[in-house]
Image (cartoon, rainbow, N blue to C red):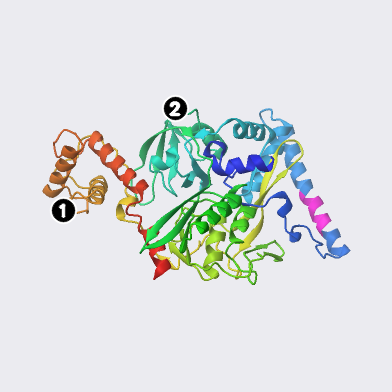
Amino acid sequence: MNLRKQHIVIILFAALVLGFAGAYFGVQLADDQTPDSAVQDSGNTSDSSNKQQGNLMGNMNKVSNAYNLIKENYLHDVSDKQLVEGAIQGMLKSLDDPYSTYMDAETMEQFNNTIESSFEGIGAEVSVVNGKVNIVAPIKDSPAEEAGLRPNDKILSVDGKSVVGMDLFEAVELIRGEKGSEVVLEVQRAGVEDPFKVTIVRDDIPLETVYSKVKKINGKKTGVIEITSFSENTAKHFSKQLKELEKKEIEGLVIDVRGNPGGLLKAVEGILKNFIPEDMPMVQIENQQGKKDKAFSELNEKKPYPISVVINEGSASASEILAVAMKEAGYEVVGVTSFGKGTVQQAVPLGDGSTVKLTFFKWLSPKGNWIHEKGVKPTIKVKQPDYYFTNPVQIKEPITYNHTGDKVKNIQIMLKGLGYNPGRTDGYFNKETEEAIKKFQQENELNVTGKINAKTAGKIETAIVEKIRNGKEDQQMEKALHVLYK
């Protein structure tokens, strides 16, 4: 698969963003970026080489014996191809690495056709975690974001068909579809007892990866650049927009990589060259022998204005490279701990159209820290308001006064976030909650009953999603802006 196709993968859930049959790439090396440490003399003596060769032959004989046993004695007919494909898949599965995967020739061809033909879907980065399709992050301005999907949401079924334990590519094929068509996802959210269903209308997936604007903070012109993924042209677009902001004489800059699941290594390096001075590496790539290759910029001095970075639990891989490099260079990082992916994969064709995507390296911070499964901790921890973490409520029978439970609690938190006072947010439907519901219904042209039916719950959820998307109470961004001028 050529680089252009890989880059499309970064931003299209419909094409299984940054992944093949198992998980998204996160950070991927381009062909011309393979570190020297990827191929080197093992340093073995001839004796040890002979011993290793003998062990290899013994193991291959074991595999051959199992192959022949199955072919000659298994109750049902089985093809050579099935056994070979199963052996490769089994080897990769035994690594217990969700980022190392295999795609056979047929799946690879279908995958390539998907990339070339489709720019439509729901728009979300995904991986597989413990057999479940895991949302890494929804793409900015995508149907998934508009529907309120969040990092770490688990997709259990698609249009009523379970995808638990299903190959990720197969699951994606169920989720993707033509613009304007609907798909119903059953979602399990951490901390919520019952799964809920979300109906999403598929649409074109936005291809832009860099967005910028100027905000006035304490009378100072401040640039804000949001990076949604790291694809082929991201660094070029970032540098162009940064220059445009500097022409407007910005006095500070915020870089927002929340919900950014990663992308190409060369893209994040191209961005860091603007900020990391030449006396410290931007990132280190370490091979299995422990040899490290360090990437440096040619920057003589830092920018003359203050800079902060915003991260969240959906910031992964290349986003974490950026965040930890900026943190160790002395810049403020605001938000909550990031996703925690510190490995690098490469796609290796096997010659017959099939491909293995294998973890080759780990990446380290400028100071040599490995954030894998730990994430990047912010220098300033800021959580979003409680209503950011509410969930859709499935209503079968109306919820009324004196009811209790998580559904009531969710509605109460949403009402409070929308400016309606429910009196409490502990899940008990009291009279104040009833009055808050009536007020909301009256102001939104609903039947004023004080009861929560499906229509009222849907209106409340829509209002909360809209409020989150407009960013008026984005506490993380507000802190990142104001910390520049503390």
Magenta segment includes 367: no
Q: Residue 486 appears in which quarter of the rendering?
A: bottom left
Element class at badge 2: loop
Q: Position of residue 212 (x, y in %)?
A: 48, 51
Of residues 383 and 63, the one drawn nearer to the viewer in this rendering? 383
Say whether residue 227 is left or right of residue 345: left
Q: Is residue 408 above or below residue 375?
A: above
Is residue 98 something one can see in this rendering?
Answer: no
Residue at screen point 24% across, 49% down: 409
- Answer yes or no: is residue 380 visible: yes
Q: Residues within 10 Å of mark 1 (few under 14, many from 20)?
A: some
The main secondary structure of the magenta stretch is: helix
Which residue in the structure is indicated by mark 2? 181
For the N terminus, give its image quadrant.
top right
The residue stretch that appears in magenta: 52-59
**Foreground: 363 or 169?**
363
Q: Give percent across and percent down for residue 184.
A: 41, 33
Judge left or right: residue 481 versus residue 305. left
Name the residue beneath numbered marker 1.
423
Taking depth in this image into account, of 118 and 474 the one nearest to the observer is 474
Question: Residue at position x 60%, y 35% from top?
Answer: 115
Nearer to us in this view, 287 or 231: 231
The amino acid type found where label 2 is placed reads Ser
| Residue density around tag 2, few if under 14, some if 14–19, many if 20 or more, within 10 Å | few
Q: Earlier in the sequence, mark 2 or mark 1?
A: 2
* Residue 417: % across, % down: 26, 51
Residue 6 pos. (x, y %)? 63, 42
Local SS, label 1: loop
Question: For the residue marked with disc 1, what is the amino acid?
Answer: Gly
In this rendering, the answer to whether 303 lies above or below 247 is below
